[in-house]
Image (tube, coloured by chain):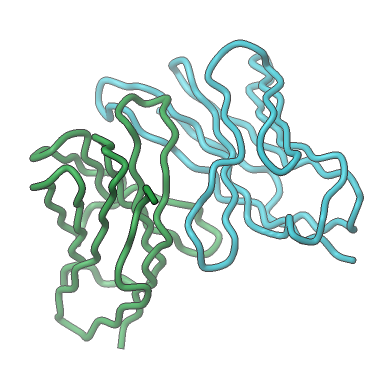
Chain colours: A green, B cyan
Amino acid sequence: DGGITQSPKYLFRKEGQNVTLSCEQNLNHDAMYWYRQDPGQGLRLIYYSQIVNDFQKGDIAEGYSVSREKKESFPLTVTSAQKNPTAFYLCASSRDSYQETQYFGPGTRLLVL
Amino acid sequence: AQSVTQLDSQVPVFEEAPVELRCNYSSSVSVYLFWYVQYPNQGLQLLLKYLSGSTLVKGINGFEAEFNKSQTSFHLRKPSVHISDTAEYFCAVSGLSETSGSRLTFGEGTQLTVNP
């Protein structure tokens, strides 16, 4: 089955720790996205990538980093600089152009210990 | 810049009643409009989208939406809801800009609760 997978489903972070969220797609999509979801705030764009080896900051990139070394993979690292990382993180992909539908993964919930 | 306003954060209705979830947008460029549904602790699933053509768009699960350019609205409707429609619904707008390339901007969501 084609789709987007995210792992882990739940992730716990200790103070001062960097953690990496995985996102993989087998849809052969060029574009991939990371969103953060907080209650009552909808989805906010963290980073997006329109092609391999290229990515752009979204609205709330501070404290996060990404890489896009392979077309199918777009991992997100939540660094220790992100002071309020507790949220639901969603990865999405789309074929290419801006009118294309974005397909979402099941999400990763990050909690701080 | 583009923005989306979902006018109701919570909409409670009884089963088999009609429902309308309201969405207004603003954008300086031509837009494409989407409605997504999210069930608890899951990702988002596309309900329907407007790209061009007929302003009445039909989607999955019996939902439809009407694009109104003069009122900059894209309201979602269903004539008769089921318990299983209980979920959060997001309106989103996509537009191309010189600075941000292609991207979706989401509203804050409307929680639809269908009661028996």
Please provide percent x and percent y for residue B109: 59, 51
Q: Quadrant of residue A108?
A: bottom left
Q: Is residue B15 left or right of residue B66?
A: right
Q: Is residue B38 left or right of residue A47?
A: right
Q: How many marks?
A: 0
- Residue at image x 30%, y 68%? A7
Please provide percent x and percent y for residue B27: 48, 23
- Residue at image x 21%, y 59%? A76
- Residue at image x 35%, y 53%? A4
Q: Is residue A88 above or below residue A69?
A: below
Compare residues A77 and A25 and report the one nearer the observer.
A25
Q: Is residue B28 left or right of residue A62?
A: right
- Residue at image x 28%, y 37%? A29
Compare residues A84 and A3 and report the one nearer the observer.
A3
Q: Quadrant of residue B55?
A: top right
Please provide percent x and percent y for residue A26: 28, 47
Residue sticking out furthest to the front:
A1
Q: Is residue A37 above or below residue B52?
A: below
Image quarter of the N terminus of chain B:
top left
Q: Is residue A99 left or right of residue A75?
A: right
Please provide percent x and percent y for residue B99: 25, 26
Image quarter of the C terminus of chain B:
bottom right
Residue sticking out furthest to the top:
B53
Q: Is residue A96 above or below residue A110?
A: above
